[in-house]
Image (tube, helix red, strand yellow):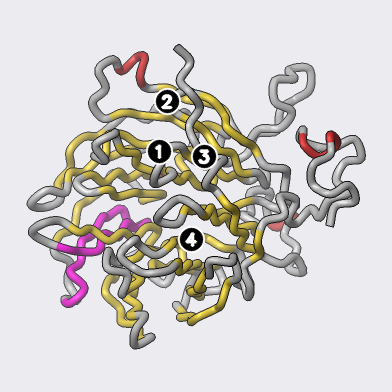
């Protein structure tokens, strides 16, 4: 508990007068801790879809496991089940009806976890680690899309050992997102490919990257009619690009902004620049959250081009984040991301998943006319 309670002038503006001595640095925002977090770095988080009653959270980790928690209305978390891969789990997603969870691993396989029976079966195979996994629900087909370091994007109907389709990419898949009828994949060497998913998946457009450094995370955003209209792309150089697919005025509508950097606008001292590890859009307001290797999360309004909030600094990086389906809960994971190499790895340090009430803080700013 903070010495001064929560609302002192000291604690509110970044680092207080007394540094971090008065706050608990592993949870400076005093958010709800998820019980029984994974035993190694947390790579991915995903909340259950709106078709399911209640809120269930899935988390994958470098301890080769995938865990499921029930998040109760009072904020309490109840561990429900867990499953294993034989290598680190890099991504997870839900089926649209909430009955299945799909998991992607460095063991080069993806699995389908039936939550009712608590059984898993392998549904995908690649030549290299599988970095991304997404469920696609189209009017005429459903499938799982996997992106791998073997430079292929594959589509699986979950019942056959062979993919329905395999698309070659120029480079290794680093991150991806799907909002039907659009998919976007960011690869090594700053590659960026948009796919259209209607009737059957096909490459729509290759885009020259708006960022100059390695791609780390990507998230699709929607327009007022809930149609996917563009994406936010994060890099390891503390920067996010907002990119529309067909903007009326590309030079004006597309932009980049800096984030997850130390000492803000002070140009006298060198700036520490951190990776943007994950981006998540609020399902109601369309505002977004970014999390970084600097151990902070920030909330942004891309339309007003303003920052809504930045958290206090946690004592380790934030590696993953997501919103629940109605946008009331923001989940974020605190664990080492190896951004400073093995000498900064401390096996004694615990990993955490935190839950924050996100209903108010992500409301958009009034537009500046």
Instruction: Say whether disc 3 or disc 1 marks the residue closer to the N-terminus.
Output: 1
**Residue drawn at (10%, 53%), measured in percent from left and top?**
200
Which residue is identified by label 3?
362
By secondary structure, the bulk of the magenta-drawn segment is best described as strand
**Residue drawn at (90%, 35%), measured in percent from left and top?**
17
Instruction: Say whether disc 2 or disc 4 marks the residue closer to the N-terminus.
Output: 4
Determine contact: label 2, label 3, CB under 8 Å.
no
Determine which quarter of the picture holds residue 91.
bottom left
Q: CA distance from mark 2 to mark 1?
A: 9 Å
Determine contact: label 2, label 4, CB under 8 Å.
no
Give residue 286's mark. Answer: 1
Q: Note whether residue 276 is visible.
A: no
Q: CA distance from mark 3 to mark 1?
A: 9 Å
Q: CA distance from mark 2 to mark 4?
A: 26 Å
**Residue drawn at (26%, 74%), measured in percent from left and top?**
123
Determine contact: label 1, label 4, CB under 8 Å.
no
Q: Residue 367's spot in the image, x, y percent?
A: 45, 20
Which residue is identified by label 4?
45
Q: Give left or right: position of 290 versus 217.
A: right
Which residue is identified by label 2?
303
Q: Give left or right: position of 211 versus 143.
A: right
Q: For the residue labelled by badge 4, is the local secondary structure a helix, a strand or a loop? A: strand
Q: State which mark lies toward you, 3 or 4.
A: 3
Q: For the residue labelled by badge 1, is the local secondary structure a helix, a strand or a loop? A: loop
148 inside magenta stretch:
yes
Q: CA distance from mark 2 to mark 3?
A: 13 Å
Determine contact: label 3, label 1, CB under 8 Å.
no
Determine which quarter of the picture holds residue 309.
top right
145 inside magenta stretch:
yes
């Amino acid at each position: 508990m903070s010495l001064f309670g929560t609302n002192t002038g000291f604690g509110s503006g970044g680092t207080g007068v007394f540094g971090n001595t008065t706050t608990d640095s592993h949870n400076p925002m005093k958010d709800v801790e998820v019980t029984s977090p994974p035993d190694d770095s947390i790579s991915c988080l995903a909340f259950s879809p709106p078709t399911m009653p209640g809120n269930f959270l899935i988390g994958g980790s470098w301890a080769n496991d995938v865990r499921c928690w029930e998040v109760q209305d009072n904020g309490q978390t109840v561990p429900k089940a867990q499953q294993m891969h034989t290598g680190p789990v890099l991504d997870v997603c839900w089926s649209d009806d909430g009955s299945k969870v799909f998991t992607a691993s460095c063991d080069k396989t993806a699995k389908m976890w039936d939550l009712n029976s608590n059984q898993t079966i392998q549904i995908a195979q690649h030549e290299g680690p599988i970095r991304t996994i997404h469920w696609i629900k189209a009017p005429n087909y459903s499938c799982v899309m996997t992106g791998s370091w073997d430079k292929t994007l594959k589509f699986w109907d979950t019942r056959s050992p062979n993919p329905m389709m395999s698309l070659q990419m120029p480079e290794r898949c680093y991150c991806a997102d799907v909002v039907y009828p659009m998919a976007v994949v960011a690869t090594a060497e700053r590659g960026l490919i948009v796919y259209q998913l209607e009737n059957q998946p096909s490459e729509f457009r290759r885009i020259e990257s708006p960022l100059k450094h390695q791609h780390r995370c990507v998230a699709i955003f929607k327009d007022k009619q809930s149609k996917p209209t563009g994406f936010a792309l994060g890099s390891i150089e503390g920067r996010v690009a907002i990119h529309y697919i067909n903007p009326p005025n590309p030079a004006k509508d597309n932009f980049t902004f800096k984030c997850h950097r130390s000492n803000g606008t002070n140009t006298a001292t060198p700036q520490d620049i951190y990776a943007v590890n994950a981006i998540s859009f609020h399902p109601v307001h369309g505002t977004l959250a970014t999390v970084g290797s600097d151990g902070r999360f920030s909330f942004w309004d891309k339309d007003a081009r303003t920052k809504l909030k930045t958290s206090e600094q946690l004592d380790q990086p934030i590696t993953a984040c997501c919103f629940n389906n109605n946008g009331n809960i923001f989940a974020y994971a605190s664990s080492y991301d190896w951004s400073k190499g093995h000498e900064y790895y401390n096996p004694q340090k615990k990993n955490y998943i935190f839950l924050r009430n996100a209903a108010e803080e992500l409301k958009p700013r009034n537009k500046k006319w």
